[in-house]
Structures are given as C-alpha cells and as structure tokens.
Amino acid sequence: MRPRRHPLLTAAPVRLAHSPGWLALVLLAGSLLVASVVAPALFATSARTAALDARLDAAAAEPAPGASADVRASWTGVLPPTAEELVLAELDALSGHGPPVLGAAATAQDRRLRSVVRVGGTAVGAALFFHDGVVEALGGDEGERGVWLPADVAARLGVAPGDRLRVGLESVTPGSAQSRSTPATLAGTYETEPGSVLPAAVAEVPGSGEWVLPLDPSLPGSASPLVITGRETFAALARAIDEEPLYAADLAVAPDLDPDGAEAAVAELQRLAVEAFDDTTDLARATDRAVPLPTRLEVASGLPDVVDDAGAAAASAERQVGPYATSGQVLAAALLVTAWVLVGRSRRREGALAAGLGVHPAMVGGLTVLELAPPAVVAVPVGTGLALLAIAVAGPPADLGPGDLVAGDLALAALGGGLVVLLPALVALAGAVRSEPGTGSRLGARVRSVPWELLVLVATAVVVVAVLSLEPSRRGGSPLTTVLPLLVAASAAALVARLAPLVRLPGARPGGPRWLAARRSAGAGGPERALTAVLAVTLGLFAYTLAVHRGLVDGAEDKVAALVGAPTAASVDEGLRGTGKRVLEPPVEGSTLVWRQRVTLPPTFGAQQLMTIDPATFAAVADWGATGTLEAGRPLVERLDEGDAGVVPVLLAGDTDREVGDRGTLEVNEEVALPYLVVAVLPAFPGSEAGTGDAAVVASSRRVFPLLPPNLDPRDPLSVDSAGPFTAEVWSAAPPGDLRAQLRSVDLPPAEVVTTAGAAVGQGLVATAWAAQYVVVLGLVVLLLALAVVLALGLRLADRDAVADVLLARMGWRPRQLAAARTWEVVRAVLTAAAATVVSTAALLLAPSLVDQVSEVLPVSRPRLGTPELAAVVGLAAASVGAAALVGLVRARRRTSAEVLRGNG
Amino acid sequence: MATAEPLVPSGPAVVASDLTRVYRSATGETYALRGVDLTIGGGTLTVVAGPSGSGKSSLLTLVSARERPSAGELSVLGSDVAGAPTPVLRRLRHRRIGYVPQRASTGLFPHLTAADHVRQVATWRRAGGDEVDDVLASVGLAARAGHRPASMSGGEQQRLAVAMALVGRPSLVVADEPTAELDHGNADLVLDALDGVARAGSAVVVSSHDARVTERAGRLLRLRDGVLSSETDRARETVAVIDSAGRLQLPPALLERFPSRRVVVEADGHHVRLRAPEDPS
C-alpha cells in the first residue's frame, strides 16, 4: 500500500472514532446544535398548522355562512344550464374545499305575493325548494319531474301522489299583484321534523340547519312549508312562474387543510369574488344570463378571517418563542464549544508538539474541520430528528413528520451541520494561535488577571437597569431580557462561590473524610471554582426554565379567564331585556348574566367598562384562572351586594390608581351619576379584560339597575338608549353548541359565542402554551449541560487528587475514605450551586416579570415554582452528587498507583 | 541513513547575547535565564547540563524558537527570535528545527502510527520516503513502525519523538532530556543518532544530567541559577564563562573561599587574580 503523504490530514476524519467518549459528547452537542437551529422553523410550521386547526375548530362552532371556514356562493334568479355548469365548475375548482352542494328556495320577491300550492279552490302557503340529495333522501329520483309536499299540506289539499296541482305565486290581497302558477305533479309526500319545515329524513344531515329556506311572509322569521323538487324541475317551475329564487352553493372546508392550502384557498376566493363582478370574465357573463334578471355571484366565507387569525397566532407564537429559541441555540453552541475546549485540553501536549513542529494554526483549524466532518454529517439527520421529536412531543399540537420538512428546513439543518464543524474549528484555531510564540514575554509586559466576578456583577447591574427602563410590553422580546437570567444566575454564582469558603462542613473530625474534603475545598483552584460556578449557573437556569414554563402556562389560563370570564360566553347584545320585574334571572340553567356598559370615573377622562354581575350565580360559573390571582376576587363577589342602597360597591380590576375605600361617582353614558365605593382592587377579574387595556369596574346588577332611569335599565322591556344600551352576555360552563341550542330554545339566539379556546387563539395565548413547551425543551438542554459539568467536576477532582490519594493510601487511608472525601467535596460544590440557585431564582421570581409577551392582557404572567418544579431541581442536585461521585470513583479505581506516580494517570 | 544533505547554516546556528527569560505569575517573577551569552555552530553535539531549575529547558525552548526571550538577543539560523514575525519563526520550526520536548511520550498523536508520525514531519521537511524507514531504524523502531503510541512503551514513544526531530536532517536539533526514559541500550541508540546528525553538519543541542550523555558531548555547557557557568570542549578543558556584562560564576568549591561574598580583583601581568578582602595581599 502506498504510504500516505499527509497522515494527519488523511487520518483526521476517523480520529474521534479512537475516543468513543469524546465522540459521543461531540455528537450529542452537535446534534443539539443542529436541532436548535432547525427547531424554530419547524416550530413555526407546527404553530401555523396548529393555529389553523385551532381556529378552524373554533370556527366550526359558528356554522353560520361567513363565520365558518365553509364557503357559500349565492346568486338570485335561474341560470341557464350551461351558465350554471360554468359557475359550479368555477366553484368546484376552488382548492381547500369540497365539491359544491347546491340548494335553492323561492323568495317571493314581491311583498304583495306569497308562494302557494293550489288544488282547485284550495291554496296552502308553500314555497319551492330544492337541495342536492333531498329528493333521493325522500325516495325519489333527481331527474323525476314532480314535487314533494309535506304530508299535512297534501292532506289539506286532498291530493295523493300522481295527482296534479298548481304551484305558484299568489296575491296577498286580491288584485294587489298578478298571481301566476304552473301545473305540477305530486311525486310524493313527506313527514316534517318536529319544529322544522325540513323533511325528517334530512333533518339530521350535517349543515341542514344552515340551508337556505323560503321565508313565510305570514310568520316573520319562520320558514315556509317546502315544495321539494329536483334541481331541473325547480328551475323549470321557477322560470314558469317568473320566480327569482335564491341559489346557494355550499362548499365544506377540507378537513385536512394545511396553512399553505388555506392561504391558496383564500387567494382563490378573493380572485373569484373579484371575477364575479368583472364584466369581462366568463363568470360574470354567465350570471348575466340569469332570469328574470341578471345577477352576480356573491361569495361568503370566514376562511380569510380564520387564516388571518391563525397567521397572527402563529406569528405571536414565533415572537414569543424567539427569545427561547435564541437561548437554545446559544446554549447548544456553548455546549459544543465547551466540549471542544475539553477535547483541546486533553490534547494540550499534542498541541504543544504541533506548535513546536511549526504547524500553522490554519492547518490546526483545517484538521478540526476534517475531524468533525463525519460527526457533523451524522448530527444533521440526528439533530433534525431530535427537533422533529421535540416539536412533536412538546410543540404545538400539529402532526409533524419528516415529510413536512421543506427546503428551508433542510438548508437550516445544513447550516447547523456547518456550525458543528465551524465552531470547534474556530476554538482550535484560537488555541493554536495562543500556542504561537508571542511578544508578551518581553520584559515590561504586565500580567493581567481578568476580574470576572466584578465584570459579571457590573454587566448584570447594567442589563437590569436597561431592562427596567424598557416599557413592560417590550421587555419580553428584548435580547437583553433573554440574557438577563443568565447574568443573574452568574452573579449569584459569583457571590455565593465567594462566600462559600467561609462555611465549614459540620462535624468534620480531624483525619476523617469530611476534614480532608474541607481542607481540599479551602485550597480549591480556579478550575474547581469555575466548574462550581458553571454548575450553579446551569442549575439556576434549569430552575428558571421550570419556573417560566409553569408561569407561562398558568398565566395564560389567567389571561383567558380574564378575557372570556367563563368556559363559554354568549353575547346576546341588546336581545335580552327584562319584563319589568325587579330581578333579571339568567335565561338558561347553569348560567349567569353579565351586563356591560361604558362608564366614566371622574376626574379620570375616558370611558371604562362597567361590568355588572349577578353575585348569586356568578362565582359558580366564572373561570377563576390557575394562579390564584383571579381567585382572590371570588370571596369579594358577595361584598358587591352589601352596604348602603344608595352607594354602589365596586371592585376595580386592572391598572388603576384608586384604592380600597375610595368614593366617587361614576357616570353612565354621561347622563347618570352613581355614587360608588371601592371595596376591592385586583389585577384582574373574570371577564375584566374583554375591553383589553381598560380597568374594569365590576358591580352588582342588583345594586346598579335600580339606580338607572328607565331608558337605561335593562329590566325595562322598552329600554333603548341611542347613546349605548347595556349589552348582555350569558356565561356558562356548557359547551358552546349546547349553550347556543339552549339560548335558541328560549328564543334568544346569540350574536356571538366565545370560548376560552377561541379567545386563546385570537389573543395569541395559545401560542404562550407552545412557547412554554419550548422552554421545557430548553430546560432539558440546560439539564444536559449541568450533567456534563457535574461529570467534568467529578473527573477534575479525581485527577487533581490522584497523586495525593496514592500517598494518602500509603499512609493508611482506605479507598472508601478517599472516595467519601471526594464525594463530600462534590456535595459542597453542589450545595454551593444550589445556594446560588436559590438566590438567583428568588431574584428572578421577585423582580418584575420578564416572561410575559402578551402583556396587553392582564394579569401579568410571572415565573412560578410549585412542588413539582422544586422536586425536579432537588432531584437534579441529588443526581449531580451521585453522578460526580460515581465518575470520580470509577476514574480513581481504573488507574494504578504506578501510573499515577509516573505521570500517566 | 538517507542521502539528503542537511541545511547547514553558513554561520553559527545559534547566537545569544545577554539572553534573559523571565516567567511571570500572579505572585511575582522568576528569572529562568540571566544574561546568557552563547554561540553554537553546526557539526557539534552540544550538551547543556545543570541541576533541576538551572534553566536548561528554558534555554532549549528559546533556542528552538518556540518562545521569545524576555530580554537580550537571540539569533537562530539567522533569524532574530525576539523580533522576527511569528510566521518566520513558525517556518523555521516547521522546516529547519527538530525538537524533542521533555516527556515527549505524552505529546504524540494517538491516532497515528509511528511511521505516520515520522512521515508527516518528513513531508513537511520535503524528505524522501525512504528516510522515514532509515530514521525509525536508527532509533530502533523499525519493527514498531505500524504501531500507535498507545501500544508502545514509554521508551519507544520517546525514541519516536527523537525520530520525528531527526527526519529531514534539520539544520538545528534541540532535544530536552531525550534519554530520560530510556535504558542504556536505547539511550546509546538515540545518542548515536544525534551524534550522526551532528557529524553530518547539523547543530545539535541536548539537555541532560545523564553522565552517558555528557561524556559524548562535543561541547558541554553547564548552567547554574540561569547563568552559564562553565564550558568544556572536546579536549576536556573546562573554562568558566564571563558574560557580556563581565560577570563570572565561580564553582561552589571555589565560592567557599569567599565567605564575605566580596572579592578583590587584581591584574598581574597576563594573569587576573581573585582574592578575598580579608586575605593578605
């Protein structure tokens, strides 16, 4: 075999294979770095998908056309078959939706006419109707030229299937308009669903509640009995009686719609809406051919709003995750750099040999590139897989797999792989340059030691001042805020490490392991102190990530509770008014009534929201959040009904400078002044953030309404105030569909139903939960860093004491005692780190919150520590002691005294 | 051995004047070398001897252009070590200086075989491929050429470091205690190889307190407390060294004659006489 000319170069790619330990560490660090680079993009993809899914789910609770993500395209008049085909083809071509399902109903467009079906001299009000699939559901054939009547209508007309009848429009009053009718054959009859005009056979068809039905002019708001036909028959009959029916084509949103598909669908919808009114397009020309009058296609869909909301939620998620993503990248890079510094330290003498041989630093860097190329090639897929796994497990709830990786993700993975090579190469280059003979050895050059502790303390102070000078709403996204926890942890570590030598291990008997550990600790060198400090920082950061996670998750629940007030809130606006009785009871069981109005609290200018509640039912229905911040308001609710009748006790929620006991007058609509007494001031209250940014004034309806004039008092059935009436909300713990049905059953259809899930999407709070999960992943990376530091500490102590241990063993010390002494040293180091963790965590918990990125919604989210978090930190500290002691023991047992004394140990 | 001719310097390989090396630490400064004057030419095996801490390693580190002097002048193969740009010194070490560090066994590349170590250096010094085998054979490692350091003994690793320093016939070979970990037979092998290089024209500087090494020195320099105290040439004539500042270091035996550490210097014709002040003239 021909000898290699440059063995260093040719052997470099397999070099790490000779050191499995270092290879594993570098692979781990490299994979984490790649994962940290790829993860933000995958998170963004996942967040977009999850936000869209969440918003689509929320929209599904609003089945009304224009609110849900389904599309309804409508036009009036009858289109010729070719024109109708063209319109339906255009609709069918819309992406992201199912095929169009067509329906139509007679409209009796002239108020002087009504739709009837007549047999001889008997006429019964009934209107033409068709919907794809209904005739088949009735047992007929779509092509069958006949009509189906409700069984009761057929009975009243005295007709049976096969009989002839006339369908048409008839003057409401004799001679008011020209009646017209056309003959038809009764194809069959059907039973109607109780309480509905629809056939019982189709009443349960999904979406049938939103079908276009003909209105009954004799009963406003009610549908007319249906004369059901097939599509062609409907068109023929409508043309024959000169009817101008309303056609509606419904397209259900695709169940697997992804963000890109949704955006494409919105773009196509917008294009279609524009083309419908552009006379030069085939679509507009087709609808021009409608009879009796030309028409235009109108497209309604909530999908654009859904996509906008989802996009905003995803953008919010990316913004909230940004600082943590950056921190993750910095940590992963630090782990890799640290790993390579350790590798470099293990090759220190080899580096001296290379410098002595005049190896150029660039070649040292190049050798590192060659050495790390294979691990980087492995780290790219492993890191990408880790990122996918982390996002799948702890990210937004979207199914993300390798198939979802796009070119951008792969490019980022490649970039991460490049960094895996580049960062260690720079470390090696810097080390080689430092090994070069310099000019610092000339006489006169001074030895400078860097005062790291002082620098860290000063930097922390500067950053604290800078962060506090930022507006609270901007703190969350600031890079300074990102770095502050690290600096606080480092400062605490520096302070505690400085004070730690003053503390003596208790019960240290001279000549025992603890005594030896104490003496060794007192003389500990820079590396031991540095490792203890790094352990303190990592432990502190780990505790902080746990606190941030809990704070964000619980804080988001508080904010949602403050936004919505209850699991489900249905707004009935001004649809609810009393009957004149003294008390307005909740309209449905298990609900409470909340009224809103704008008020002014002089001398403060500007309106604030007044929220009047029913204390008797409020506490049981309201959502009191998770942290206890809102819960503080629960026992205060009853106090809103106490006190003098002429003074309204109020609870203020939000930013206010008023205090408990303050009195004044609040002006309702600038026309009524009500004396009030502040009985409580809270950061937030259920529903207080509906008007985000204002302090809410919470009072009892029973105390406010009696003081209002009749035109404002909602108990008065005729109360209408042009300047702004009280609006009502019904809060309930029932699911939105149930509450909607309950309210409809009491003739109180809600204008809008808000759920906690929907509000979380709309305000970006759902993204907060995802960002919190990202913090957990970050905590795991910190955890790995902490364990790596602990292992390094264990090895360092074992190596430092190698010679001394041999000599002590010859003096009669048993291996068990020497291991115990090392363990006590580790215990001391970990206790020092734990003390620093307590200091830094306490400082970060007590300081103004830095983690709230949705600060416009109160209450402010703060890091919080609970029992599980404390148990995790204590567990990590205990595991650290065990791991360091174990690795030190193994290291010490593996070498012989001869090796140690020869210098190879 | 190979046929390649050494890059013999036209003048002295090393010229030092008032060479000073100071190590600084947080607790103060330590003078390792104090005003050493020295000239080393090619074709000689120069041995630097002295007790531990006398400054041998510091002197060899400077002479091999691995560090710069704190003060004084040092010219190595024509380059001013104190003032030359770093790339110049790097090229010097890369191509023209062979160096064997103390405890060289810990500084080898663990993933390369013995032959690869030597071949890599040979490539840098543009030596022929057959020279690799010759050098390995000269230090008794021909049979271990395919082994990695981990499977070699400490002595074999030390000899490998010597082979790396010798390959390519550098103009200057500097070896810091190259026989410290070797038995007699292998030490002789190494010394033969070093001697051979010196005879071929290279300047060879070796530090040692091993009597076998000092006996074979063409020139023996003794260092004490960072000062060059005496020099012995091949004719075994030992002379004391007066540095460029006029300082002279007396051997300990003579120093006892001056208990007050004061001396009267008297010139008498062709002689200079040293007398304790308390002694009668």
Image (spheres, coloured by chain):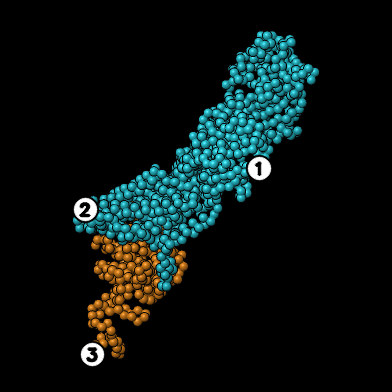
* Mark 2 residue type: Arg
Badge 1, how many Cα within 10 Å: few under 14, some, many 20+?
few
Q: Residue furthest left?
A: A812
Mark 2 → mark 3, Cα distance in angstroms = 66 Å
Q: Which residue is mark 2?
A: A814
Q: Nearer the viewer, residue B163 or A366?
A: A366
Tag 3: amino acid: Pro
Q: How many numbered tags mark residues here?
A: 3
What residue do we see at 21% from left, 55% from top? A813
Nearer the observer: mark 3 or 1; the answer is 1
Residue A160 in sight: yes
| Left or right: residue A89 compared with residue A619 | right
Q: Nearer the viewer, residue A58 or A345?
A: A58
The numbered dot on residue A671 is 1
First in sequence: mark 2 vs mark 1: 1
| Residue located 38% across and 72% down the image | B14
Which secondary structure, mark 3?
Answer: loop
Q: Nearer the viewer, mark 2 or mark 3?
A: 2
List x then y, in percent, for residue B108: 35, 57
Q: Are dots 2 and 3 on a single chain?
A: no
Vertical relation: A349 (above or below) A730: below
Residue A688 in the image, given as x and y percentages of width and height: 55, 41
